[in-house]
Image (cartoon, helix red, strand yellow):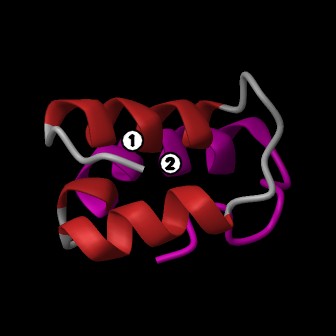
């Protein structure tokens, strides 16, 4: 899935990514979600990392 395609080039692109992120994450299988979270190199506080972590909690997926 890679919710971090490349760094957004402007505010509009950042907004588009933020709007489609929940749908992209919801479409992941449990194993894909777990893998995306574990393989992410994002730093703490990253919005994508936080969204993946929140979805893991919602689905009650253990790491």
Identify the residue at image location x=29%, y=74%: 31
Residue 56 in magenta? no
Q: Position of residue 61 (x, y in %)?
A: 24, 47
5 in the magenta segment: yes
Residue, disc 2: 16
**Left or right, residue 27 beside residue 51:** left
Where in the figure is residue 38, as x and y percent of width and height? 59, 60
Residue 5 vs residue 9, the one in the foreground: 5
Does the CB distance between marks 2 and 1 fall below 8 Å? Answer: yes
Q: What label sits on residue 29 in the rendered view?
A: none
In the rendered image, residue 2, in percent from the top left (x then y), is placed at 57, 73
**Residue at 21% of width from left, 66% of height from top?**
30
Which quarter of the picture shows residue 9?
A: bottom right
| Residue sitting farthest toward the top | 45
Q: Which residue is mark 1?
A: 19
Q: Nearer the viewer, residue 50 or 31?
A: 31
Left or right: where 3 falls relative to 33: right
Q: Position of residue 6 (x, y in %)?
A: 79, 68
Q: Which residues are magenta?
A: 1-24
Secondary structure beneath dot 2 equals: helix
């Amino acid at each position: 899935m890679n919710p971090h395609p490349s760094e957004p080039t402007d505010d509009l692109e950042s907004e588009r990514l933020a709007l489609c992120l929940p749908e992209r994450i919801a479409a992941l299988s449990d194993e894909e979600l777990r893998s995306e979270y574990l393989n992410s190199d994002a730093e703490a506080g990253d919005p994508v990392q936080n969204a993946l972590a929140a979805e893991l909690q919602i689905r009650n997926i253990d790491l």
